[in-house]
Image (spheres, rainbow, N blue to C red):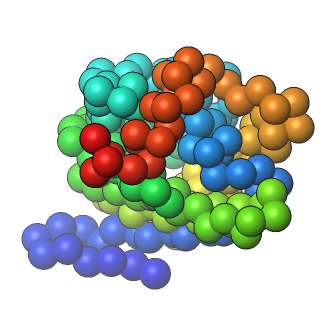
Amino acid sequence: MPHTSEGSELADTVSEQMQVRADPDTIFEVIGDFATYPEWQDEVQEAEVLAIAEDGWATRVRFVLDAKIFTTTFVLDYVYTDTTISWTLVQSDTLRRNDGSYTLADHGDGTTDVTYTLVIEPTVPVPGMLRRRAAKRIVEGALINVKARAERAALTATAPPTPSREDPGERDRRRHPQAR
């Protein structure tokens, strides 16, 4: 589903959903553990947290990504809600747009639907078919890797270390920031 923004080339939106055998908190912790992305996200070559909120969750992250048709460095700003981790592009050497989200829907039975939506638009002309193929590969690969890592964490009941693991109250404050 293409998206057109005034004065820009065509941007491509890709959205995929996958059911994960883990609770939303475990999945949030996997997705929010940016420093480990190069270990388990194939396209991510580097991830550096540049800013952290009071609750310990990253709000700005710099990435170096190899999307096969190009390598890019970009900075994203992150926002967290009870069910969503979303991001917007702050700066990039080859992207005009890189906005997206992970949305979690808890089934209450130990499974969660994870929907990854990505809108990507390079600054250089790339044929639409190649843009869509690259975006789809990024989304599908990320979901497969999030699923594997979250399910492994759920089975061992030991999620990757994040600030919320050090202080369980942080998770509640993050999930309900208005309660502060």
Picture residue at 39% right of the left edge, 78% below the top: 2
Q: Can residue 13 be seen here? A: yes
Residue sitting nearer the eye, 112 or 63? 112
**Percent coordinates x, y for residue 3 in the rendering:** 33, 77
Q: In x, y percent, where is residue 130?
A: 52, 61
50 sits left or right of 105 in the view: left
| Residue 49 sits above or below residue 32 on the image | above
Q: Which of the two residues, 163 or 139, is positioned nearer the viewer here?
A: 163
Q: Position of residue 128 (x, y in %)?
A: 44, 70
Q: Furthest residue to the bottom? A: 1
Q: Say above or below: 123 vs 38.
A: below
In the image, farthest residue toward the front? 179
Q: Quadrant of residue 61?
A: top left
Residue at x-position 50% and y-position 60%: 83
What is the quadrant of residue 9 in the picture?
bottom left
Q: Residue furthest right?
A: 155
Q: Nearer the viewer, residue 24 or 167?
A: 167
Relative to 64, 21 lies left or right = right
x and y, in percent, of residue 7 in the image: 11, 71
Q: Name the side, left or right, on which 163 lies relative to 123.
A: right
Tell me the quarter of the image containing the C terminus: top left
Taking the image as shown, residue 7 lies to the left or right of residue 59, namely left
Residue at the image point whose x is 71% and y is 61% from the top: 112
Q: In the figure, residue 92 lies in which quadrant?
A: top left
Which residue is drawn at the image coordinates 74% and 65% (left, top)?
Answer: 108
